Image: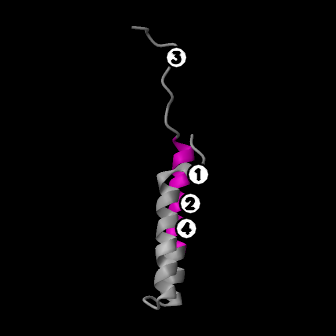
Amino acid sequence: MKPGVQTSEFILAVVTLVCLTVLVALDKIDGTVFGTLLTTVTGAYSLSRGVAKINPPKAPDASGPVD
């Protein structure tokens, strides 16, 4: 299993958070909306990592038939 920082979920979460921070800095969204979206993105990332750890991808079986 890949470490969390090497997953597409992590990259997507970081890009989203950077975009939200830029929007707040430019006064396009207010702090309440930022806080809500920040919590949502962080929660979604945590859930996706939890699901990945519960059901890790299976490695090919080394004892299977050889061609």
Confirm or deny contact between disc 4 and disc 2 (CB under 8 A): yes
Left or right of 16, for residue 1: right
Rounded to the nearest angstrom, the CA distance separating label 2 from label 3 is 32 Å
Residue positioned 48% across, 78% down in the render: 20
Q: Nearer the viewer, residue 64 or 17?
A: 17
Q: Main secondary structure of the magenta part?
A: helix
Rounded to the nearest angstrom, the CA distance separating label 1 from label 4 is 13 Å
Q: Which mark, residue 42?
A: 4
In front: label 1 or label 3: 1
| Residue neighbourhood size for the residue with mark 3, other residues' Cα within 10 Å, grouped as few (<14), some (14–19), many (≥20) | few
Residue bearing the label numbered 2: 46
Query: Disc 2 or 3, which lies upstream in sequence?
Result: 2
Confirm or deny contact between disc 2 and disc 3 (CB under 8 A): no
Under mark 3, the amino acid is Ala
Q: Which residues are magenta?
A: 39-55
Residue positioned 46% across, 75% down in the render: 19
Residue 46 found in image quarter: bottom right
